[in-house]
Amino acid sequence: MSTRNVSNKQVRDLQRVTHLVAALVLVLYVYLPLGSVPLLTTVLQFAVLPLLAATGMLMWQWTRLRKLLTTFLGSTPMPWQKHPAGSQGKR
């Protein structure tokens, strides 16, 4: 089984893009007359707003969360950790 190394920069970039897309949806909802569309209101309430909150918290507290996960999971390799050469198995 192969695991993919994900760099910290890639994680941050993904969080930022997700946060910006969700914010764009929220801005469109607020500034365009789409309030009468019930499906859009439901999606906004149960998907976009929680996604904005989660990505904002992750961007704000990523260092603490990474340290906490490393402490609790110990030596289990995390996707953001660099693996020593040869420890990824045979291909």
Image (tube, helix red, strand yellow):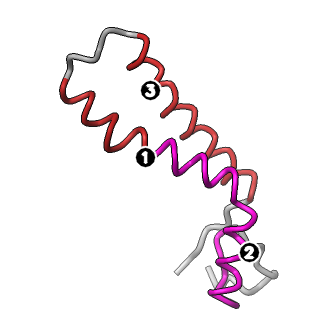
Q: Is the stretch drawn in magenta largely helix, strand or loop?
A: helix
Q: Earlier in the sequence, mark 1 or mark 2?
A: 1
Using the numbered discs, state the Cα–Cα distance from disc 1 to disc 3 in whole angstroms.
11 Å
Give the magenta-colored segment's residue range: 51-79
Q: Which residue is mark 2?
A: 67
Using the numbered discs, state the Cα–Cα distance from disc 3 to disc 2 in whole angstroms.
32 Å
Q: Is residue 74 magenta?
A: yes
Q: In the rendered structure, are the residues bearing label 1 and label 3 in contact, judged by CB atoms less than 8 Å apart?
A: no
**Residue sitting farthest toward the bottom:** 75
Classify residue 84 by image quadrant: bottom right
Classify residue 30 by image quadrant: top left
Q: Which residue is mark 3?
A: 26
Quadrant, the C terminus: bottom right
Q: Which residue is mark 1?
A: 50
What type is the residue that disc 2 sits on?
Lys
10 Å crowding of disc 1: few (<14), some (14-19), many (20+): few
Using the numbered discs, state the Cα–Cα distance from disc 1 to disc 2 in whole angstroms.
24 Å
Q: Position of residue 31 (x, y in %)?
A: 43, 11
